[in-house]
Image (cartoon, rainbow, N blue to C red):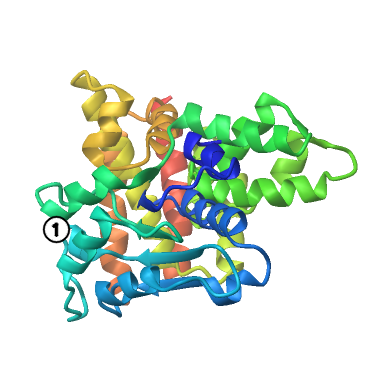
Amino acid sequence: MLPEWKQICSKKISPVYLIIGTEDYIINETKQLLIDNILDGDEVEFNYANLDLEEMPIEVVVQEAESMPFFGDKRLVMANNPIFLTSEKSKNKVEHDTAKLEAYLNEPVDYSVLCFVARVEKLDERKKLTKLLKKTATIIEAKRPNENELKKWIEAKLHENNIQMSQAAINRLMELTSGQLTTAMNELQKLMLYSFETKEITIQVVESLVVRSLEQNIFLLLDKMIAMDIGGALRIYYDLLKQKEEPIKILALISSQFRLLNQLKLLEQQGYSQQQVASKLKVHPFRVKLASKQAKNFSEIELNQALKRLAEIDYEMKTGFGDKEQKLEWFLFELQDNRQKSL
């Protein structure tokens, strides 16, 4: 649990909060914790405002915060999308009187809690208002966790619900959800409900219940090719077609994975660590970790040949040359054949 969450749960509530980051799980859990610990039951209807700063000016938000609570002791005002605090340009032409907010931050009322939710990586630190908000608000970072942090999130939720789960099962859950906190926690909730009576989540339960994303299926497909299991690779491919996935979309994801393997191999040869590769390529570190294992099974020549062939298939698909579904099928056979020759 985040230290800020512990403070909220112990009723040590700040007058102003700033949630910053793109991790939905942390954002949504923080919102719910604030609601549960500030408002009682029916008070939500009268003393809770959830406002979008892309649709209304900041002075309306300040006015809501300054309004006295109705049938309760506190008001809670959520102010979403404060784009005027970033370097991004707003899509809408809403004018904000930021002087109103500045005055409020200098003297917030004691009967309201104002929470800004900025679904961005960072605010514009050059702005005076940003500096003031970060100085006066309790900041909760909704950032993507690294592998160890994600494992701690999962273990904490398991402990909270008194459910056992082996490290192998936890690792498999992390792999199948590509190291994404929100996805992992959603799937974990489903696993815990399924294992309510046994109080144990096995790796078999993870394998059978966790929904694989299209990206994860592509990763598994390549794993099958590396293991020289053409039958397994084709089964995954046919399942994707049955799920009405477009061959062009499947091709794009296969190409993306091969590009990652190629870039990863080149950067590792130059001495880059996996963390540095993730930062340079702007991909999730967990995805880099898994891709590194796959990259070891291909030579640079094999990767370049595969990328060239994928580019040719992409052109053929988009120009209507031949059967789209069959082209990817043949690519898998060609890839298998090339791998056998290289061994």
Residue at 44%, 40% (x, y): give it.
337
x, y percentage for residue 191? 73, 47
Q: Is residue 238 left or right of residue 293?
A: right
* Residue ID for mark 1: 87
Q: Which image quadrant for residue 267?
A: top left
Q: Can the viewer see residue 268 in this picture?
A: yes
x, y percentage for residue 135? 25, 43
Q: Is residue 157 left or right of residue 193?
A: left
x, y percentage for residue 22? 38, 52
Q: Amino acid at mark 1?
A: Ser
Residue at 25%, 51% (x, y): give it.
133
Residue at 31%, 54% (x, y): give it.
310
Using the image as rendered, state which of residue 297 and residue 82 is in the foreground.
82
Q: Which quarter of the figure is the C terminus placed in?
A: top left
Residue at 53%, 55% (x, y): give it.
34
Given the current orientation, which residue lies at the most extreme right position?
A: 197
x, y percentage for residue 33? 57, 52
Query: Does 159 appear above or below 185?
Result: above
Q: Is residue 328 left or right of residue 165?
A: left
Q: Which quarter of the figure is the N terminus placed in?
A: top right
Query: Does 128 appear above or below 303?
Result: below
Q: Can the viewer see residue 142 in this picture?
A: no
Packing grade of label 1 (10 A; few <14, some 14-19, many >=20) is few
Q: Secondary structure at mark 1?
A: loop
Using the image as rendered, state which of residue 23 and residue 252 is in the foreground.
23
